[in-house]
Image (spheres, helix red, strand yellow):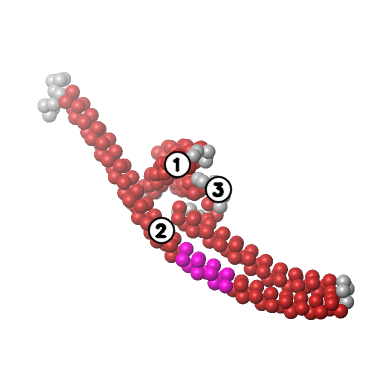
Amino acid sequence: MGVFSSDGRSRAERRAEAKALKAKAKLEAKFESKDRRKAAKATRKAEHKLRGKELKVEQKTAKKAAKATRKASKAQVKVAQAEAKTVAAKAKAAADAKPYSPASVRRYLTVGRLVAPIVAPVVYRAAVAARARFSSMQAERVGVAPDVLRQFSGHGASLAARIATARTSLDKVAAQDTTADAKAFVDAIGKRLDNLAIAVDAAEAMAAGQRRTAHRAIEDELGAIDADILARLGVRS
């Protein structure tokens, strides 16, 4: 009676069956995780393609805006130059009549004061606007906020910004779910992000080819982490 159960199976058979079920569940979970990463990779590829199209439109718009700004700046410069020529002509006539007089010196200085306030602000505003627009487009391309991207520099600035953004999302997970399981998840993802941050810093000293390879690996890992965080929040790709 002790060797066989009531359904006619031995304890060894039931243990073997339980072990097989456990192995099956583990295999299914592995395939599900693989499918999830594959789906996330496909989603990222589609998003990158869409961002590329959007970037082309934005670059075209920015180019037109820059062209219009340059045109307006040239017109303003021409007006300023015409005014400066008029003032210079008057100053020259006065100087010819009375060389090196205080009035002549003041007139020449006036020419500089007329041109500088018009040209310098226009050039400065155009440079600042172009730099801000480029930063914004670069941030949109990697999926982070422009303010976050501006906090980092170097070849891996965009990856460092993505790591910082992932940390922010992870903090939200920790605040939303305080269970032991959630804490373990947050700790595990946090360690992965720490390792990726170290990898980004290390890649800065690599040769260009090695750095590109390292950045691709880091980007793939970040994609997997983003997918895991989204899944934790109940968002399925």
Q: Which residue is mark 2?
A: 52
Name the residue at 48% across, 53% down.
Answer: 144
Mark 3: amino acid:
Phe
Does residue 118 show up magenta in the picture?
no
Q: Range of the magenta residues?
A: 59-71
Q: Position of residue 26 (x, y in %)?
A: 27, 35
Q: Which residue is mark 1?
A: 209
Total residue callouts: 3
Name which quarter of the figure residue 123 lies in: bottom right
Name the residue at 25% across, 33% down.
Answer: 22
Q: Nearer the viewer, mark 3 or mark 1?
A: 1
Name the residue at 31% across, 49% down.
Answer: 39
Up the image or down, 81 lies above or below 20; here it is below
Up the image or down, 22 lies above or below 132; here it is above
Q: Earlier in the sequence, mark 2 or mark 1?
A: 2
Q: Which mark is residue 152?
A: 3
Q: Position of residue 63 (x, y in %)?
A: 50, 66
